[in-house]
Image (tube, grey):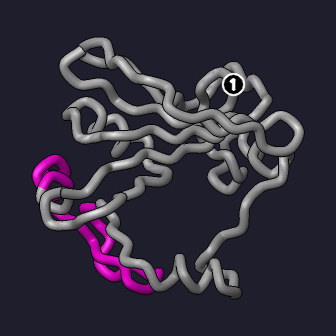
């Protein structure tokens, strides 16, 4: 059975919206101010080659032909499709980006681990990693790492039956 891991770039106040500034959010672009990462589909080299060759799954009701190599579109009920994928695959299934998908997966108790790259900026507005939930969500901090000048990489494990 696969392990679902959420990986997000987040501000100190929990904002995940438009870190690269490409979506037009007025406070977007905070990611690049602290040494942003490359877009792998447009890069080359050993690490990019590895990422480009890995299987990728995209949850979408409109996308027909994903442009990134080795991508499969998951259509239909997201909870059913992700649950099925989790049963079929071994190893880590890492979810990047989509806050809506993240909220759905967390609400349906499908997430095993949360990896946060916390950026030292407070935005005061924007879409947050955690919205309203139906119940509390206990987690256990399992790893911390400081990166560069002020970035914190935090790994949490979701605690079940707490």
Can you say whether 159 is above or below 72 in the image?
A: above
Can you say whether 110 is above or below 96 in the image?
A: above
Q: Nearer the viewer, residue 56 or 98?
A: 56
Q: Is residue 74 highlighted in magenta? A: yes
Image quarter of the N terminus: bottom left
Q: Is residue 38 left or right of residue 55?
A: right
> Residue 9 falls in which quadrant of the image?
top right
Q: Residue 114's x, y, as percent?
A: 45, 38
Q: Is residue 116 left or right of residue 148?
A: left
Look at the image and give the residue range highlighted in magenta.
60-83
> Residue 149 falls in which quadrant of the image?
top right
The residue singled out by tag 1 in the image is 12
Q: Secondary structure at mark 1?
A: loop
Q: Residue 52's x, y, as percent?
A: 52, 82
Q: Is residue 67 highlighted in magenta? A: yes
Residue in view at x 20 percent, y 55 percent = 82
């Amino acid at each position: 059975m696969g392990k679902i891991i959420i990986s997000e770039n987040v501000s100190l106040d929990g904002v995940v919206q438009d870190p690269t500034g490409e979506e037009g959010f007025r406070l977007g672009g905070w990611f690049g101010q602290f040494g942003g990462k490359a877009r792998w589909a447009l890069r080359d080299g050993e690490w990019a080659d590895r990422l480009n060759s890995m299987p990728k799954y995209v949850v979408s009701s409109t996308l027909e032909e994903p442009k990134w190599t080795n991508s499969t579109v998951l259509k239909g009920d997201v909870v059913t499709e992700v649950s099925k994928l989790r049963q079929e695959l071994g190893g880590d299934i890492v979810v990047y980006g989509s806050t809506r998908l993240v909220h759905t997966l967390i609400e349906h108790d499908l997430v095993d681990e949360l990896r946060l790259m916390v950026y030292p900026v407070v935005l005061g507005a924007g879409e947050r990693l955690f919205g309203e939930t139906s119940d509390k969500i206990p987690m256990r901090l399992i790893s911390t790492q400081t990166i560069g000048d002020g970035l914190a990489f935090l790994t949490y494990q979701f605690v079940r039956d707490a």
